[in-house]
Amino acid sequence: MRSNYKKLGQFIQQVSVKNSDLTVDNLLGVSITKKFIPSIANIIGTDMTIYKIVQKGQFAYGPVTSRNGDKISVALLENDEAIVSTSYTVFEIINTNELLPEYLMMWFRREEFDRYARYMSHGSTREAFGWEEMCDVELPVPSLEKQNEIIKEYHTITDRIKLNEQLNQKLEDTAQSIYKEWFVNFEFPHNFSHSELDSESNIKPYKSNGGEMVYCDELEMEIPNNWQIVELIDMLDIKYGKDYKHLNNGEIPLYGSGGIMKYVDKYLYSGESILIPRKGSLNNIIHINQEFWTVDTMFYSIIKTKFSGKYLFHILKSIDFYSLNVGSAVPSMTTNLLNGLKNLKPENYVLENFEKILIPIFKHKSILKDENETLERLKEVLLSKIATIDENEKVVIKK
């Protein structure tokens, strides 16, 4: 053990408080992105009194690592109390005057910790990183002042990331509103040429200004004249993502259902695409227009119809996949289900003008996304520096 390193076991202790009186109903799970997330488990008929309570400032982790790829699911609860399955180990820091929970969570977020946990996992049927292994973890524990300094610098980065995410959400809400007005309310501007608007003063919404509507038996509703009903396969070619374990670190974003997982040295596809989760969080639809790789638990798409990428993205975003027959224990998507989805195919000039309007919004979103990717890398640099931090060294992160 390095001189400034200490074993984690002297700072933590297990907690096992059962939800015996059913006072807590906020059921959470822990993702491989190191966050608490709403559980998707089917709990009908389940005895919730045996579930474990997690309090704010406590940790929970899933000891079984063989099904998590190269990640270990561990998270710090930062909000109100919750309950987790008995499969999780709940623990807390004994004395926060010696070790701060946020500092320890930063250690858990390091790629080196994940590699260590996978290496130390054992078992014949399924590999697990048990409590003894967790207690044997070694880490530097500097003074509280230094820990707080590192946490502050970390928050400088993560707060900016959150701000960009909020701005991105507002842009997405704007785009979604335009989509709804055009393709749900059918109030798209209709008195323009096929290539550009004649004049702003002549723009009028289609349906409310007498645009011709026809009844569609398949959708049991009226739709604009000359629009078609097609299956998704007519507009998108759905492909499976691929395993990434053979790839090296690089500059290409690797996507999972929660977003970018890491950066690799090869790309699976380059250009505009829509990423669709195959399992779990099915509604985390991602639009991308660059080189990327995506994992084998995701679909990616090749867009067949010109000017339809952003339109199809919003169609998929609006679908409640859980209302479809996707299974209950582990909801999963199939190519047959996706390919057979019926959707409206507007006239080409409508798609073209919708694309033109959304391009500035998506460009701004892309700028914010690129900035966040840079900040995420900077965050990883800071996490890596924890292993070699000098008590007298000033941690400096440029804002």
Image: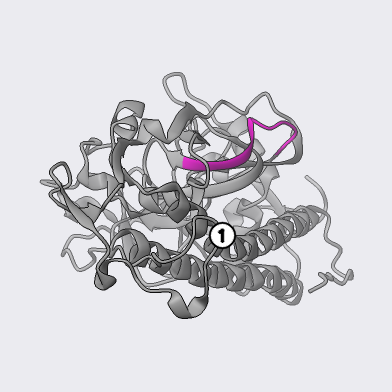
Whether residue 299 is situated above or below residue 360 in the rendered picture = above
Q: How many marks?
A: 1
Question: Which is nearer the eye, 126 or 169?
Answer: 169
The spot of residue 9 in percent (x, y) is 58, 52
Residue 126 can be seen, yes or no: yes
Q: Which structural element holds mark 1?
A: helix
Q: Residue drawn 83% across and 71% down? A: 398
The spot of residue 283 in percent (x, y) is 37, 49
Asked if the stretch drawn in magenta spans residue 265, the answer is yes
The spot of residue 88 in percent (x, y) is 38, 47
Question: Which is nearer the eye, 235 or 282?
Answer: 235
The structure's colour scheme is one colour
Asked if the stretch drawn in magenta spans residue 97, the answer is no
Q: Amino acid at mark 1?
A: Lys
State which region is magenta. 264-275
Whether residue 341 is situated above or below residue 58 in the rendered picture = above
Say left or right for 313 vs 369.
Answer: left
Circle 1 packing at 10 Å, graded few (<14), some (14-19), many (20+), is few
| Residue at image mark 1 | 356
Residue 332 can be seen, yes or no: no
Question: Which is nearer the eye, 70 or 296?
Answer: 296
Which residue sits furthest top?
124
Say left or right for 336 vs 1.
Answer: left
Q: Residue drawn 55% across and 31% down? A: 121
Q: Residue drawn 71% across and 70% down? A: 147
Tell me which secondary structure the magenta stretch mostly adopts: strand
Q: Residue drawn 50% across and 72% down? A: 170
Which residue sits furthest left?
45
Whether residue 386 is situated above or below residue 248 in the rendered picture = below
